[in-house]
Amino acid sequence: MLCESDDFLNSPPKKTVRFGGKVTEVLSNYSQGKTSDFDLLIHQLSDPEIKDAQIINWLHEFRNSITYLTIDYEQLVSILLKLPWINRGKEVVEEYLAFLGNLVSAQTVYLRHCLRMIISHFVPARIIIREGDVDISDSDDEDDGIFATFNTCHRALQIIARYVPSAPRFLMPILVEKFPYVNKSVRTMECYVHNLLRITVYFPTLRHDILELVFERLLKIDVSASRHEIEDAEEAALQKDGANKSGTEEGLFNMDEDLEENVSVTVNSDIMAHPAADRLDTLMLVVFAYIKNMCYTSGSLDLNKTKDLYKDLLAIFDKLILPTHACCHVQFVMFYLCSFKLGFAEAFLEHLWKKLQNPNNPPIIRQTAATYIGSLLSRAKFIPVLTVKACLDLLVNWLHGYIDNQDAGSRAFCDVSLHGPFYAASQAVFYTLIFRHKQLLEGNLRKGLAYLQNLNFERIVMCQLNPLKICLPSVVNLFAAITRKYQLVFCYTIMERNSRQMIPIVRSSLGGDSTQTCTNPLDSFFPFDPCILKRCKKVIDPIYQIWEESNTEDLKGGHKHVKGVGADEEDDFLKGETPHSDTMVGMTPGSLEAHFRSPASSVGSPPVSFLQRPF
């Protein structure tokens, strides 16, 4: 066998036994109405037992007759595109790639057909085992050569693009069309998303559209599996595993897509008990690997590449993630990217801040932006105290300005539909203080207390808008305990008055009337609550700040709490531990570029051990 593909392509094909005349003669006769040889040709090409030498011989002839293959011969070309070529020997693969290049360059009408054929190989092949007339198995093909197959597919796309430079423009609709349904197996989804992301490496013009497609599908999976459903499924699996402890110790992974929800999960397994959560966990891991691979070169952060990717992801965040209510995990992509360098975290915070303070944005978008600011400041271990202070200054000053504007007006009363962004920003400030108060005070207690006193929480709490009535009770309780401990403001009088009134919330941010008392009138959620996806959690935990349960015990003792919220309704930050951030870097104002002027403004990225194959 010759090693060089060029030598191979210039060599004559092997002679094989076949029936019928040459391809040019068959096509010529067919155009004259003589179909017997054409039918025989179709029959021979459709033979499932066709040999490598036969395929090579046919393809060589078709390459020499490529100008004859007009749209009139669409049936014949469809048969050629269905030939089992991709898992054959090198000679067949090289001949077929050469045929594809000749076909799309001479007959561009078949460009979409060729692209669809290639994309169909982006998922593992199916194996069907039959007993009689009954299919007894339909599982993913875990052939060791699957990655070689994917490599060949990407090579084919690049060859077609070399002959037809406009090919990427026709590719995107096909990628959308061929995207697997969400009920397909985890392996199928993982392979397809991995191959989509790999396309962005050599077709950079498609990157934004491909990323948008991937995140759109991830969000659909995310919102279909709530945090409570995932936790309940894990708890049920844990109980089942304990009951079956005397049986097999390893979970059985059923690859059948229709029975995948019956997967048995062991306690120590990375497989999620909830099928949608398992898909999301696997796909998020692929996206994390892609981000890491795109941003780092030889172990060092490539700032320019990371900036370009950040801009694409930020646009997708604005379009898809930010407007999606209560998604649990997809937003951690931004959290992860921001951990690479402090400048990205600062730029993201500034972007969210602009969303919050812009009155032209819909109130619900402004409120959600505030929740992202509070959650990121509280949970990101890589954000230093000086950056937290800079953000608190912005938020608190904006709150005081908002109160100034309302004091003289006729709308200075508690109403979430009128002042939603104000309440969301207040809750973000309270939430941040709960998580960061120790770091704000450590080192120099007097100086720290002076800073917190200058924020003038008393004016915010005592204002007629009454934010303590609207914010989540779990947040209000801990904020009140902290501010009382350090004598910043005494909230309990207002909290007890609000509790006694028990006035139903008439309007909510979702619109419409309500006659029930609501403990979450803002429809609040904290986007960076703890990640409960097992695989992704290993990536996020090193950069994630969790709540220290001892803080809760110290602060709660002896004080009344807001009525209407039970222990099981309290926010996730009431569980866990909170390590301290030990990085102190100032926040730089201005555009995205301004966040990267200082080389000191950098936080290292955690290692991504799951990255096994490059994009």
Image: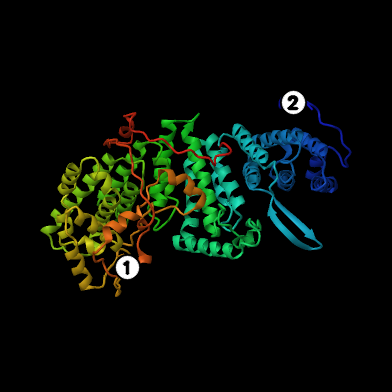
Identify the residue at image location x=35%, y=58%.
Answer: 574
Position of 387 compared to 249: left or right? left
68 or 234: which is nearer to us?
234
If the image is split into quadrants, where does the N terminus sit? top right
Amino acid type, label 2: Cys
* Mark 2 lies on residue: 3
| Residue on which disc 1 sits | 565
Q: Residue furthest left?
A: 408
Give coordinates of residue 518: x percent, y percent. Answer: 30, 69
Please tell me in which quadrant of the rendered image residue 470 appears: bottom left
Question: Who is closer to the viewer here, 156 or 584?
Answer: 584
Foreground pick, 529 / 241: 241
Of the 4 image quadrants, the one containing the C terminus is top right
Query: Which picture quadrant has residue 196?
Result: top right
- Mark 1–mark 2 distance (CA, rounded to whole Å): 72 Å
* SS at circle 1: loop
Residue 121 in view, yes or no = yes
Left or right placement of residue 501 versus residue 251 in this view: left
Up/down of 44 relative to 5, above or below: below
Residue 383 in which image quadrant: top left
Which three-letter amino acid code belongs to the residue tagged 1? Val
- Label 2 crowd (10 A; few <14 / some 14-19 / many >=20): few
Q: Position of residue 244 (x, y in %)?
A: 61, 64
Q: Does 409 sit left or right of 271 as displayed?
A: left
Q: Position of residue 384 (x, y in %)?
A: 31, 40
**Residue 422 appears in the picture as rendered:** no
- In primary-sequence order, the first of circles 1 and 2 is 2
User: Residue, x 49% and y 35% (percent of image)?
Assistant: 294
Q: Position of residue 433 (x, y in %)?
A: 26, 51
Q: Secondary structure at mark 2?
A: loop
